[in-house]
Image (cartoon, grey):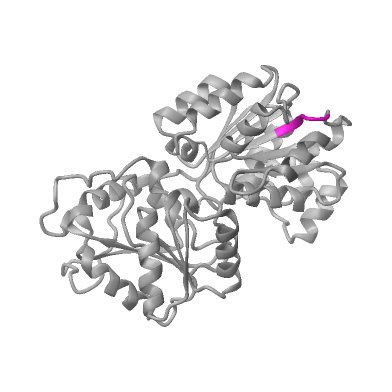
Amino acid sequence: MSIESFEEFGLSPQINRALLSLGHQTPTPVQAAAIPAVLEGRDLLGCSQTGTGKTGAFALPILQTLSQSGGRPRRGSARCLVLTPTRELALQIADSFKGYGRNLRLSLAAVYGGVGQMPQVRACARGIDVLVATPGRLLDLIRQGHLSLGNLEILVLDEADRMLDMGFLPDIKRVLAMIPDRRQTLFFSATMPPAIAQLAGSILDRPVKVQITPSAVPVERIAQRVMFATQSEKRALLGQVLGGVDVDRVLVFTRTKHGADRVVRQLAQGGVSAEGIHGNKSQNARQRALANFRSGATRVLVATDIASRGIDVEGVTHVINYDLPNEPECYVHRIGRTARAGADGVAISFCSAEERSCLRAIERLIKRSVPVQGPNAPKDGGGSKKYGKSSRRRPRRTGSARAAA
C-alpha cells in the first residue's frame, strides 16, 4: 500500500506541523519504506542515491522516538549520533533536524573541524539529544574528555561509502568500540560495494533493507552527454559550454584540489563568477562559497568529490565533469546534483584520451552509452565503445581520496 501523506506514519502533531510549514506533504519512496521500520526500533540498511530524501528517512523517526521516550541526555553525553564524512553534510543534516524538530524540546549540536571547538565543548557539557558529527572532531572531543558515547541509543552512519573512501574506517571502528551493544543502528550508503556490505553486516542486527533506486542508475530526467577533448582543450571547451543560453547555475567537478583552484582562476580571467570548494578551504570559506552559489551571487561552483557531499542546492541546471572520476560511482553522485525536485538537468562530461577507460567504466555501471556531442563526435553519436580507439591504460591515481579532496 502506498503512503500518500506524512500523517499516515503517526508522527506527533509537532512534527507534522513542522513538515507542513516546510511544504513537505508526500514522503519520498525511501522515506515511505524506511520510516515505519525505524519507528519500530529496527536496524536499517538503506541504499539510495543522492537527492532521494535519505535525511528525512532517518531524522523524522529519530525525532519521534526521542521525543516520545521522555528521556533526557546526561551531561557530557549524546542520545543519538549521526556520523557523516564532511562538514557541509554535517551542517545540512543538522539543518534538517532543526527544521523537522522546531516544535520539539530536543537539543541538537553539530561538531566538525575547521572551526573553534569551544561552542561544541559547551554543547557537549550540557548533554545532547541529537549529535551530528564528522569522525575527526568527534574523536578529538572524546579524547579530551568532553563527550562520552556510553549512553548512546541510536547510531546513524550516513554516506558510509564516502567515509570509507576518505579513509575513516579506523575512526568508525573506534567509535563502534565506545558505544553500547544494545542500540538501534541505521546505515545509509549511496552505493553498496563489498567493503560497505561487509561493514554493514558486522554492525547491523537483522536489518530491514531499503533500496529504492539502484545506485548505478542516474536520475532519468538528466540529459547526459560527453564531449571529447584533450586536457589542454578543456579550458576553452568549458568557456563555450558556459556561454550557452540556458546554462544558469553550474556545478563543475575536478579530480583534485589544485585542479579546482586552477579552473576558478581561469574562469575569473574570462569574467565568469566562480568559487571553489574543497578540503583545503576553511570552513568559513566553504560556507560562504555555498551561500553565494545558492543565492546566485556566484554562477559557477567548482568542487572535488569529497567536498561535494553536502552540496544540496536547488536549481542547478548543469553539472560539468571537467575531469572524469576514477570511480564510476562518483559519476552518479556528481550528476545527481542537478534535476532535483522534479526539475530537468544536464550533465556534460569532458573526456580526454587518457580518460576513455573511465568513460567505459561509467557506461558499464549505468548500463547505457553516453551520447557524444561536439566537433569530435562520431557520426553515429555513440559513446566510448563506438568512438575510435581508446587507451587501455587506466589513469594513474594521484594520491588517496583524502589528498585529492
At x 60% / y 19%, what residue is drawn?
177
Asked if the magenta segment contains residue 234, the reply would be no
Q: Position of residue 87 (x, y in %)?
A: 58, 48
Q: Which residues are magenta?
A: 75-80
Q: Position of residue 255 (x, y in %)?
A: 35, 53
Q: Nearer the viewer, residue 347 or 12?
A: 347
Left or right relative to 114: residue 103: right
- Residue 398 lies, with reference to residue 351, above or below; the image says above
Q: How many marks?
A: 0
Asked if the magenta segment contains residue 79, the reply would be yes
At x 52% / y 73%, what residue is drawn?
298
Q: Nearer the viewer, residue 157 or 49?
A: 157
Instruction: Judge whether residue 127 can be spotted in this image.
Output: no
Instruction: Judge whether residue 331 can be spotted in this image.
Output: yes
At x 83% / y 30%, what residue is drawn?
75
Q: Position of residue 19 (x, y in %)?
A: 77, 54
- Residue 267 lies, with reference to residue 334, above or below; the image says below
